[in-house]
Image (cartoon, grey):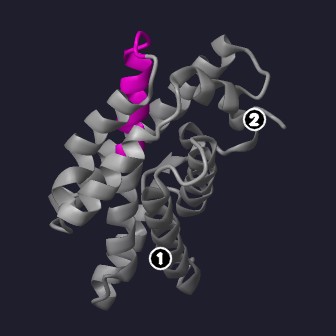
Amino acid sequence: MAPYFETAKSFADVPLTDSGYATVDFLKASDGLVAMFDLLGIGIFSFVQADIKSNIHGVRTTYNSNPNECYTLEKLVHSEVDDHKKHGTASLRRLIRGLLFTCRALQNTLANPQEAQLQPSFSRAYDTVLRHHHGFAIRAVVQVALKACPMRRDFFVRIAQGGSQEKLEEELSRWLAGLDNIVRHMESFYEMGGYGKI
């Protein structure tokens, strides 16, 4: 099996033009993120994975309904505003939120190499990004999932698939930098345009 970053599209490779981030490339990178959650272990964060899949589908459906107008994420939102629709815009907002959670969790992981488990990094990201969007029942499910996070070493071995640790950390840093740029850009775009808060 090839190393994860040799098969998944990197968020660092999603083109940014004057019109915004390319929708098709963004969706391909988001599809790759779903595969990364599989590497965390069966059932771990299945609620996040299911939410991300559902929102990818929502954005893709909106794009496919009008690819000439929705070729960037920003154009997709504008097209729905013009048509008084909200499905793709809401799906994109929730998708960005899930990506933000993942981004912050993995940034925490890289910034704290002394932590043997992923759980502290993912807990901090959850508390910052998603907790206030969830009710009591979902929070309880999340706490169980967080306890089942794999050891840091095991996760990195699964992603590397025999590749070097140094190369893996380099690719992960690049992937995260690209994702962070997209998330920050879209957060600002939604807020400044009055499309809702991420």
- Residue lying at 56% horizontally and 60% vertically, measured from the top left: 27
Task: Specify the label residue 96 is tagged with.
Answer: none
Could you say where residue 150 lies in the image, as x and y percent from the top left? 52, 33
Identify which residue, 154 or 104, lies in the foreground.
154
Q: Quadrant of residue 138?
A: bottom left
| Dominant SS in magenta | helix
- Residue 91 is a magenta residue: no
**In this rendering, position of residue 28 left or right of residue 70:** right
Estimate how packed mark 1 is, as few (under 14), some (14 to 19) or many (20 or more) residues with alpha carbons within 10 Å.
some
Tag 1: amino acid: Gly
- Residue lying at 54% horizontally and 86% vertically, measured from the top left: 65
**In this rendering, position of residue 81 left or right of residue 39:** left
Q: Which residues are magenta?
A: 100-115
Residue 31 in sight in this render: yes
Query: Does 75 sit above or below residue 147?
Result: below
Identify the residue under disc 1.
58
Identify the residue under disc 2.
6
- Residue lying at 44% horizontally and 24% vertically, measured from the top left: 117
Query: Does 58 sit above or below residue 182?
Result: below
- Residue lying at 79% horizontally and 22% vertically, measured from the top left: 162
Could you say where residue 177 lies in the image, as x and y percent from the top left? 45, 30
Estimate how packed mark 2 is, as few (under 14), some (14 to 19) or many (20 or more) residues with alpha carbons within 10 Å.
few
**SS assignment at label 1:** helix
* Residue at mark 2 to residue at mark 1: CA–CA distance: 27 Å
Identify which residue, 166 or 20, lies in the foreground.
166
Tag 2: amino acid: Glu
Could you say where residue 106 lies in the image, as x and y percent from the top left? 43, 31
